[in-house]
Amino acid sequence: MTTIIAAIAANNALGKDNDLIWHLPADLIRFRKRTTGHHIIMGRNTYESIGKPLPNRTTVIITRNQQYKAPGCVVVHSMQEALAIAKNDAQPFIIGGAQIYEEAILFADQLDITEVHAEFKADVFFPKIDGNLWKETKRETFSSDEKNHYKYSFVSYVRK
């Protein structure tokens, strides 16, 4: 069950200048809980924005750069290689960035989305979630609070 996990704004914004636009601690906690113990598959820019392998996960980086190295990570050169590395994981997670999401949304089994109920100026965006291909199965909505400055929802989808 390959799962895409992402936090996206109301205008599908993901980030700007290779960084997150908002700070939402509840999303970070959820991300850690969901992905711990699994393979996390990402593009090189996403990895470099994080800056290190995340603990208790197998970090798989996709890059076209044949010379790229990242200590403590598995570096591959295609989505197919990344999925082959994660083949024994019951639920590998695709964690970005935009180009990786564009490719993965064509075959992923599930979407694990945090909707941030605000619009932001961005330079990378999540692909449109096509209601003809995806069925929403769960939604939890939360108000903003002193730690999470935006209203947000955790939304789960499965491929139809």
Image: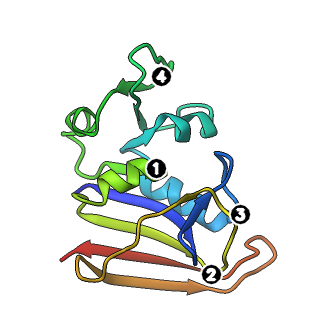
Labelled pair 4, 2 in contact (Cβ < 8 Å): no
Q: Which amino acid type is shown beneath numbered disc 1?
A: Gly
Q: Amino acid at mark 2?
A: His
Which is nearer the N-term, disc 4 or disc 2? 4
- C-alpha span from label 4 to label 2: 35 Å
Which circle's residue, 1 or 2, is located before the other in the chain? 1
**Residue that carries the numbered disc 2 in the rendered image:** 117
Disc 1 designates what residue?
Answer: 96
The answer to which of 79 and 29 lies nearer the viewer is: 79
Badge nearest the viewer, 4 or 1? 1
Instruction: Please identify the quarter of the rendering in which residue 152 is found.
Output: bottom right
Residue with the mark numbered 3: 22
Q: Amino acid at mark 3?
A: Trp
Q: Counting other residues with Cα less than 10 Å from the Cα at mark 2, is it few (<14), some (14-19), or many (20 or more)?
A: some
Residue 105: image x %, image y %? 30, 60
Q: Secondary structure at mark 1?
A: strand
> Which image quarter holds the C terminus?
bottom left
Few, some or many residues within 10 Å of mark 4 (<14, 14–19, 20+): few
Q: On the rendered structure, is 11 left or right of 58?
A: right
Q: Quadrant of residue 144?
A: bottom right
Q: Position of residue 119 (x, y in %)?
A: 66, 76
Residue at 23% in and 63% down: 109
Q: Residue at x 52, y 71 (%)?
A: 114
Q: Position of residue 159 (x, y in %)?
A: 22, 72
The residue wearing badge 4 is 72
Real-space Cα distance between discs 3 and 4? 28 Å
